[in-house]
Image (cartoon, grey):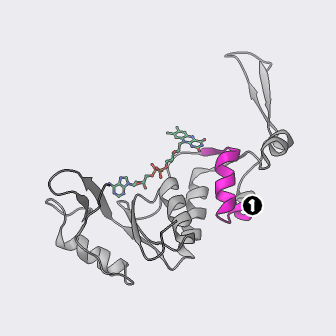
Amino acid sequence: MPSAGRTVYIAGAGIAGLTLALALAKFGASVVILERSSTVTEFGAGLQLSPNARRVLNQLGLDRQIKAESLEPEGIDVYPFGAKKPLITLALGDTVERRYGVPYAVMHRGDLADLLHRACRRFANVDIVFDVSAKIRMGDADGLYFRKVGTCGRSPGRSAVAALSAACTSRPAPSTLRFKSN
Ligand SMILES: Cc1cc2nc3c(=O)[nH]c(=O)nc-3n(C[C@H](O)[C@H](O)[C@H](O)COP(=O)(O)OP(=O)(O)OC[C@H]3O[C@@H](n4cnc5c(N)ncnc54)[C@H](O)[C@@H]3O)c2cc1C
């Protein structure tokens, strides 16, 4: 993958953005995540980590941390409405691990986001810029634009450039980032 030497900009420090950042950083790319919130926050409760997702996270070196912070249920009972006995029990636990080579787990969404955030912070080539909203515009002025949350007017604004410059000490911060589709 020809990532080394490139800077990749990711809109959003959610579960997907942070996972992508980790993967790209491991290939040597410089990554800048633009997050419109002021912290990494994940609303909601539990999240299922199916074996395909878990395999990717394991490949990113997160197996031990996920094991420590998740639960690996033996199965799921499915009840018809109002019934006292389950209609069916889906076997998970060892059954899934034998079949797919990795376990099925559940964990708190916020814990996964936090774990990914901590992993990203261990990479010098990943910057996360908070309070910056990103927008991709197609047409005459193709590009990725960003603006600092809370400022008025259309991007790119001076304050956004300043925010990005301050956070990305290792690389210059252009006000407009063009991309080419070919
Ligand atoms: C009810 C529900 C249950 C689910 N259960 C599961 C499950 O059990 N297992 C599973 O694998 N998946 C589950 N999913 C799907 C999973 O939550 C999503 O696939 C995942 O959260 C997507 O991650 P994301 O990073 O793309 O988006 P998000 O987690 O939504 O993060 C987006 C981030 O981008 C930021 N942002 C948005 N726009 C901008 C912008 N313009 N500029 C800068 N920052 C921006 C936001 O502030 C946010 O931090 C569930 C989804 C829902 C709704």
Left or right: 60 with respect to 169? Answer: right
Q: For mark 1, does the 10 Å Cα neighbourhood hold few (<14), some (14 to 19), or many (20 or more) residues?
A: few
**How far across and how far down the image is residue 156, in percent?**
19, 65
**Can you tell which quarter of the image residue 32 is in?**
bottom left
Pick the front one: 22 or 138: 138
Judge: label 1 CB < 8 Å from ligand 1: no
Residue at x 74% of width, y 64% of height: 64
As for residue 51 lying within the magenta part, the answer is yes
Q: Nearer the viewer, residue 120 or 5?
A: 5
Which is more toward the observer, 75 or 141? 141
Dominant secondary structure, magenta = helix
108 horizontally vs 138: left or right: right
Residue 174 quadrant = bottom left
Please report the residue visible at 47 percent of the width from the left and 58 percent of the height from the top. Answer: 17
Q: Residue at x 48, y 68 (%)?
A: 2
Relative to 165, does residue 148 appear above or below in the rendering?
Answer: above
What residue is pinned by disc 1?
Answer: 68
Q: Quadrant of residue 47?
A: top right
Q: Is residue 167 above or below residue 87?
A: below
**Magenta stretch bounds:** 46-65
Q: Position of residue 24 (x, y in %)?
A: 52, 66
How many tags in the picture? 1
Assign a secondary structure to mark 1.
helix
Q: Is residue 150 left or right of residue 15?
A: left
The amino acid sitting under disc 1 is Ala
Q: Quadrant of the C terminus?
A: bottom left
Q: Residue furthest front?
A: 182
In depth, the one of 140 and 78 nearer the eye is 140
129 within the magenta span: no
